[in-house]
Amino acid sequence: MSSPATTTQSREILRLAVPAFLALVAEPLFLLADSAIIGHLGTAQLAGLGVASATLLTAANLFVFLAYGTTSIVARQVGAGSERGALEAGIDGTWLAVAIGAVVAAAVALAAEPLCRVFGASPSALGHATTYLRISALGIPAMLVALAATGVLRGLQDTRTPLVASVAGFTSNIALNVAFVYGLGWGIAGSAWGTVLAQTGMATGLVVVLVRHAERAAASLHPHPVRVLRAAVSGIPLLVRTLALRAILLVTTWVAAGLGDVPLAAHQVAATVWSFLVFALDALAIAAQALTGKALGAGDVVAARSATSTMVRWGVWGGAVLGVLLLAVHRVLPAAFTTDEAVRSALAAALVVVALGQPLSGYVFVVDGVLIGAGDGRWLAKAMVATLVLYLPLALGVHAAAETLLGDGGTDGQVVALAALWVAFTAFMAIRGALFWWRIRSDHWLVTGASR
């Protein structure tokens, strides 16, 4: 029978994780709807959207530390009993997002065509991609402000407001895109303007909520240059972590491209499925960030350890459930994405490996959230760089053995080659998990107090 403390802790985890899960799942669903709107304009427009979106999301996701790092800092202040300090730290992070966003937006807008050309798209697709990216770059400051504001609210133990903002933002995005693309006949430019306006509205709504919190706590809304600079410096380790992770994902895609069109197409879908499952498991990681930061800020190491054990257990079991569900549909699911039998066969094999690795993914994402919440950014950066170094020989080994794995180039060889790549990718997760296990069993990450 569970103790009252355990029951309360479980309810707290669910209170944070469930809204976070719904917000995370809402994003890819609405993005799919956005793609469908553009897809009806033509293949060149859809291809252009793919290139521009990849560039735009990379430019924004590099600065995800604005959400993760802010959550940790704010949660520690909350745990220490300083709501005013928490909000002022969060507001400094939001001002940092404005500054970074302005610089990145200008750079992306000015270099829109060269950035899109890197992908090797056709001339017609390149024109649409450049148009979309140049306009949508105007929304980058809003994207980064929304990240920072979301991080502040999560640190305040509020994941419901970001959920409301996400649903409102993505719903308005679809409505605006339909109106601009079809109603006004603006084409892909209309979709870009709709996205910019929706992102701006979402960021504005979140900032309004922050300002109200600040007014109640008598927190200053003015930027403090020294503290903003300190926030930027503290975010560098998480930026390094993100860059190393992106490098791993890009190297994996590069190896898949070297295996041929069929394995590459199957890999793209498998990676999309893996990413969708990551969104589900990442909800617990977000709860882990908020609860760990709050517990350590309050100096309660026992609570931090207890919450970690509970969330790790839930993450592993959650991953196992997702894995079983994926195994049940791994032969059926490919038909929803392609009519090519060779791609279906390769994808089905890859999905088996993805499914078997889900319990490991659950462990990795939860512990990653715990360590981010603990403010253990420097160790996370070193660990991810080490993981990249250890993974490269595995990925390059698959690339070097491509000819042998593919055999005569038939379906069987393509299945084996892609399965081998996903086994290597799962080994990357295992390396990451082993490093996390080594770190979490020590006490080095358990630094208490309002700041680390």
Image (tube, rainbow, N blue to C red):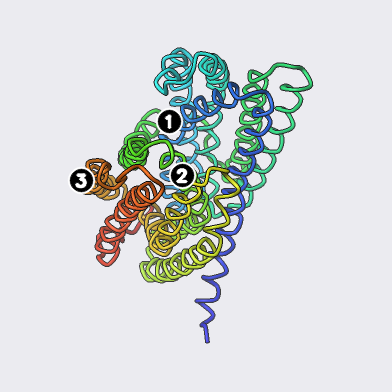
Callout 2, which amino acid?
Answer: Ala
Callout 3, which amino acid?
Answer: Pro
What residue did someone put label 3 on?
393
Query: Residue 106: horizontal and vertical position, in percent?
Result: 47, 16
Name which of mark 1 and mark 3 comes first in the sequence. 1
Of discs 1 and 3, which sits in the foreground?
3
Of discs 2 and 3, which sits in the foreground?
2
Callout 1, which amino acid?
Answer: His
Q: Please state if 399 lies on the left or on the right of 342 as rendered.
A: left
Q: Quadrant of residue 149?
A: top right
What residue did someone put label 1 on?
224
Q: Residue at x 66, y 34 (%)?
A: 36
**Distance from the alpha carbon under mark 2 to that under mark 3:** 23 Å
Query: Residue 421: horizontal and vertical position, in percent?
Result: 33, 48
Q: What SS does tag 1 mark? A: loop
Q: In the rendering, which numbered label is found on residue 32?
A: none
Query: Residue 163: horizontal and vertical position, in percent?
Result: 63, 48
Q: Residue at x 50, y 32 (%)?
A: 144
Q: In the rendering, which numbered label is found on residue 266?
A: 2
Name which of mark 2 and mark 3 comes first in the sequence. 2
